[in-house]
Image (cartoon, grey):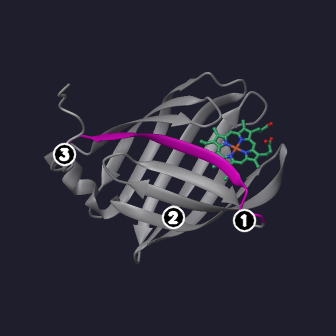
Amino acid sequence: MEGAGAPAQPPAPHPAVAPLAFLLGKWRGEGEGSFPTIAPFRYGEELLFSHHPSKRTWKAASGEPMHAESGYWRPRPDGSIEVVISQSTGLAEVQKGSYDSERKTVTLQSELVGNASKVKQITRAFQVVDGELSYVVQMATITSSLQPHLKALLKMV
Ligand code: HEM
């Protein structure tokens, strides 16, 4: 039986994505995590911004897989952006925020955090400086106010 199947070539990027071209590619690096209620930890990370962005992380010392997530970024020409993310822990996020293609920044605040037992709010801030991508993820839980959980510095590979 004949079917359309997957197209051989990915479609051309939507014009709205052009201002975020500074993020497109595969990034790799290391990060550190903390929160008042947990022991600090270090991790490795690979982050792919493509037409299907995703990220996976592993324990810095042993290489064992840690958290992974995947989602879609929906930038608009007015500089606003909406992101949907599904996490390997079962948590679903809708984030809203803004991007600045001159400063190479994206800042996001959760509009919705679903299927989470503890997490109330998540913010993410990305910046590319001298070709390196740094980000900070903050979260608020039922016991702790909004504060950093993850910080990482990644290089394009
Ligand atoms: C702990 C949420 C990303 C590693 C936690 C806790 C929460 C949480 C709610 C428990 C805190 C508590 O009990 O008070 C999140 C959210 C993330 C995220 C919402 C993404 C936005 C990550 C990533 C990693 C990670 C990317 C690894 C690279 C850990 C570790 C702990 C932890 C090691 C402590 C051990 C544990 O309780 O399982 N996280 N996390 N998290 N998270 Fe995350």
Which residue corresponds to mark 2?
134
Q: CA distance from mark 2 to mark 1?
A: 17 Å
Residue 43 sits above or below residue 121 on the image: below
Q: Residue furthest bottom?
A: 130
Q: Which mark is residue 60?
A: 1
Q: Name the kind of residue labelled 3 in the image.
A: Ala
Q: Is residue 71 left or right of residue 73?
A: right
Kind of element beneath mark 3: helix
Q: Is residue 67 magenta?
A: yes
The reply to whether discs 3 and 2 touch (Cβ–Cβ < 8 Å) is no
Other-residue count near label 3 (Cα within 10 Å), few / some / many at <14 / 14–19 / ≥20: some
Residue 127 sits above or below residue 79 on the image: below
> Which stretch did the figure color magenta?
62-76
Image point (64%, 46%), residue name:
67
Q: Is residue 87 left or right of residue 26?
A: right
Image point (17%, 31%), residue name:
4
Which residue corresponds to mark 3?
16
Q: Earlier in the sequence, mark 2 or mark 1?
A: 1
For residue 104, say whether it is visible. Answer: no
Kind of element beneath mark 1: loop
Closer to us: 16 or 58: 58
Please identify, in this view, whether the residue under mark 3 or under mark 1 is nearer the observer.
1
Quarter occupied by residue 116: top right
Other-residue count near label 2 (Cα within 10 Å), few / some / many at <14 / 14–19 / ≥20: some
Mark 2 within 8 Å of ligand 1, using the beta carbon: no
Q: Which mark is residue 127?
A: none
Image point (77%, 67%), residue name:
61
Q: Name the kind of residue labelled 1 in the image.
A: Ala
Image coordinates for residue 56, horizontal then vertical, percent: 57, 52
Image coordinates for residue 135, horizontal then vertical, percent: 53, 58
For residue 68, say whether it is visible. Answer: yes
Other-residue count near label 1 (Cα within 10 Å), few / some / many at <14 / 14–19 / ≥20: some
